[in-house]
Structure formats: structure tokens, C-alpha cells
């Protein structure tokens, strides 16, 4: 009996993802990737003085004319902005706006992990918003800045 329980836990953990949804409304998130982070990881290690590449594959549920990326680090339940070099998700990210409904797309960008960032554990909240500030998608990525 206990062998079945161990097998069930291993099977569930094999399908686990390192990110979680935090309120996706206008899309279906298919996959999230972060450079150097495996799906089986409990948190991603972000190395200071480097760039982390993030990719999000998603399918919009409606046509989206414009999309903006907003990133925060959540520290003690307080959102701290992480500035992006290019917040317009329709520029230099693999997206061509307008995005058609029900067609899978892939957003790819880099997040500078500045040397000045403290070495801490943080939840990275990555949102894509419409030009009306409606949430297209939202994912939380547990991370450790090292």
C-alpha cells in the first residue's frame, strides 16, 4: 500500500511546474520557461549581474490590440517593481500585435538581474496587461536571487 502512495507522489511531482497562475483572465497559459530553471524546480535561481530570459506560451481568448508587461517582486506581501527594458510586449518579444483570439503565441524577453539586488528569496509576479489594464495573464515564479 505505501508503495502505491510513493508512486502517486512521484507521479504528481513529475507533472508539477515551477510557476503558478495568479489570475489569468484573457488567455490560457500553455507553458512558462525561465533560463536555467527546470520544470521540476521549486524555485528558479536568478544570478545577479546577468539577464534572465523568460518565455510564456499562451493562447488569447480574444483579440488583443496591445499588450504590456508588468513585473513585480513580492517581498513580505508587498509588490516591488522590477523595471523592464521594454515593457511593450508587442516589441522585441516575438509578439506581433494585434494578437488573434485562439491562436497560440510565444512571448520572450529578458529581465536584468542587477548586481545591486539583494540575495533573497522572492516571488516574481509577471503580468501581461491590455491597453485598458485588463489582465491577460498572470504567473508567479518562485525565485532566489543569488
Image (spheres, rainbow, N blue to C red):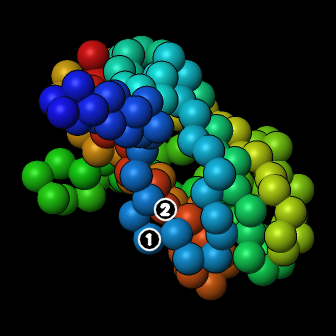
Question: Is 25 situated above or below 106?
Answer: below
Which residue does the image show at 74% across and 76% down from the upper left? Answer: 61
- Asked if disc 1 and disc 2 are in contact, CB closer than 8 Å, the reply is yes
Q: Secondary structure at mark 1?
A: loop
Question: Does residue 21 appear left or right of residue 60 in this picture?
Answer: left
Disc 1 or 2, which lies upstream in sequence?
Answer: 1
Residue 114's image quarter? Answer: top left
The answer, for residue 18, to whether it is visible in the render is no
Which residue does the image show at 56% across and 77% down from the upper left? Answer: 25
Residue 93's image quarter? Answer: top right
Say the numbered circle drawn on residue 121: none
Mark 1 burial class by Cα count in 10 Å: few <14, some 14-19, many 20+: few
Which residue does the image show at 35% across and 21% down from the upper left? Answer: 45
Question: Does residue 121 appear left or right of residue 94 in this picture?
Answer: left
Task: Give the image location of residue 75, x and y in percent.
Answer: 17, 48
| Quarter the N terminus occupies | top left
Question: Does residue 40 appear left or right of residue 119 in this picture?
Answer: right
Between the C-alphas of marks 1 and 2, the distance is: 5 Å
Mark 2 burial class by Cα count in 10 Å: few <14, some 14-19, many 20+: many
User: Which residue is denoted by mark 2 in the rendering?
Assistant: 138
User: Which residue is denoted by mark 1 in the rendering?
Assistant: 23
Question: Is 17 situated above or below 62?
Answer: above
Front residue of 115/20: it is 20
Q: Secondary structure at mark 2?
A: strand
Amino acid at each position: 500500500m505505501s508503495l502505491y502512495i510513493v508512486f502517486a507522489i512521484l507521479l504528481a511531482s513529475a507533472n508539477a511546474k515551477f510557476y503558478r497562475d495568479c489570475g489569468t483572465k484573457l488567455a490560457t497559459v500553455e507553458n512558462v520557461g525561465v533560463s536555467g530553471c527546470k520544470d521540476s524546480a521549486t524555485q528558479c535561481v536568478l544570478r545577479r549581474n546577468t539577464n534572465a530570459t523568460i518565455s510564456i506560451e499562451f493562447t488569447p481568448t480574444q483579440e488583443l490590440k496591445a499588450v504590456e508587461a508588468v513585473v513585480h517582486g513580492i517581498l513580505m506581501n508587498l509588490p516591488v517593481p522590477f523595471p523592464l527594458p521594454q515593457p511593450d510586449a508587442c516589441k522585441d518579444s516575438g509578439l506581433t500585435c494585434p494578437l488573434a483570439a485562439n491562436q497560440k503565441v510565444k512571448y520572450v524577453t529578458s529581465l536584468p538581474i542587477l548586481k545591486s539586488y539583494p540575495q533573497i528569496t522572492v516571488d516574481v509576479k509577471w503580468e501581461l496587461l491590455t491597453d485598458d489594464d485588463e489582465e491577460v495573464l498572470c504567473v508567479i515564479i518562485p525565485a532566489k536571487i543569488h
